[in-house]
Image: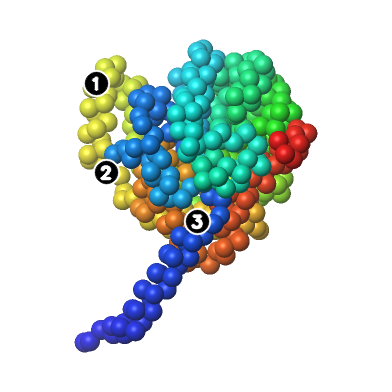
Amino acid sequence: MKRNRPHSSHLRASRDHKAGLWEKALALHREILTLDTHADTPLVFLKKPFDLAARQAEGHVDLPRLRAGMLRAQFFAAYTPPRFRMGEGALNFGMRMLDAIHQMIEGHPTDLELARHSSDFHRIAAQGKIAIAIGMENGEPIERNLANLRNFHRLGVRYLTLTHWFNNHLGDSSTDEAPLWHGLSDFGREVVRECNRLGIMVDVSHVHDEVVKECLELSTAPLVATHSNARALCDHPRNLSDELLRQIAEAGGVIQVNFCNDFLSQPLCDHSRAYEAEGRRLRHELQDEAEIAERLQAWRVACPPPPRPPLAVVGDHIAHIVRITGSVEHVGIGSDFDGVTSTPLGLDDVSAMPNLTCHLLERGFSEDDLRKIWGGNLLRVMAAAERTAGVRADG
């Protein structure tokens, strides 16, 4: 029995269509402000300083790849690891992270410039530079002192991720074993109010659902989830339920989609959670760290992870958020590059950003939609936070 083969003219038309989309994606990247709200490159730099101007063999972000991907603006995360629990040494580490970011910018003045205000981004991009903005990931460095938060703002911090993997002195994390505060702590509420006063965006990635709900009630500015996905498509507590997606959108906020496979793909999420459960079991039974590591490695060999998903999985989360919120006004990009080990095929590093644009064009998103997704929506929320704080439109 003969199989029907596609006619050569159909194959040629398909190739021409894809080539046209690719050229359109490249043209769009050359024109619009492309902004990513989360990269952990400063932590890589702090651990082992490297020349940002040289293309690195590892990691996701450096200047050559930023230029290749035509990314115009990047929020660098001043991340404090969860080993600094309840304020012990966190301020010192947070200040080292902020210093690392400023070193990276000051070391490349012809390529990078610090963006302190929403109006800075287009100005910096027009000069051919990449705008670098700062987010603080994990509120531990505040160490129960609002003066520290005010100083972080003076150093350029423009969003605050309230918690990280564990509960802290501000509130509950989505991934700790059990709630400590059942939402925000009293001090956490003070921090949200002070963020509103300063014009720092309140970031609800990593936080417990009850913290999101409290922030929605308390904050006088829209919220941002700088690197989170849709829980309906990948059931991980780090992701946001449809109810919370709608509520964040109704309050004018934005959800920036994360490229971490564990938060995009249910099979990979399930595998990672099984690995974490095995680790907890072994630590309960064994004392020797070397033996635990050896047993965990054996588990990974016996239970290898599923294959990496295609880039389309990112498009699925974006499309879902648009459908649930009813508008393209409430979604953006927060890659988590240099903070994750596994990303979808076709998004290996920051140089691959046009691949995502091409895919979204193929899915039917318009050029105007992509302007909003790639930065317009986030800058709208940032400007709203500034207006709440009484910051002048010119900064």
> Is residue 21 shown left or right of residue 34?
left
Q: Which residue is mark 1?
A: 290
The residue that disc 2 covers is 304
Say which element carries label 2: loop
The answer to whether one can see residue 65 in this image is yes
Q: Which residue is mark 3?
A: 30
Q: Position of residue 88 (x, y in %)?
A: 51, 12
Drawn side of residue 13 relative to residue 98, left or right: left
Q: Residue at x 39, y 75 (%)?
A: 16
Q: Nearer the viewer, residue 353 or 3?
A: 353
Task: Confirm whether residue 309 shows in the render.
Answer: no
Q: Residue furthest top?
A: 88
Question: Which of pointers 1 and 2 lies earlier in the amino acid sequence?
Answer: 1
Q: Residue at x 28, y 19 (%)?
A: 289
Nearest to the observer: residue 304 or residue 122 = 122
Classify residue 309 as left or right of residue 205: left
Q: Amino acid at mark 3?
A: Arg
Occupied quadrant, residue 340:
top left
Q: Is residue 315 above or below residue 284?
A: below
Cα distance between the residues tagged 1 and 2? 21 Å
Rendered location of residue 164, percent (x, y): 52, 29
Question: What distance separates the C-alpha of mark 3 from that of mark 2?
Answer: 40 Å
The residue under label 2 is which amino acid type?
Pro
Q: Reading the chain from its start, which is encountered first: label 3 or label 2?
A: 3
**In terms of image quadrants, where is residue 276?**
top left
Q: Secondary structure at mark 3?
A: helix
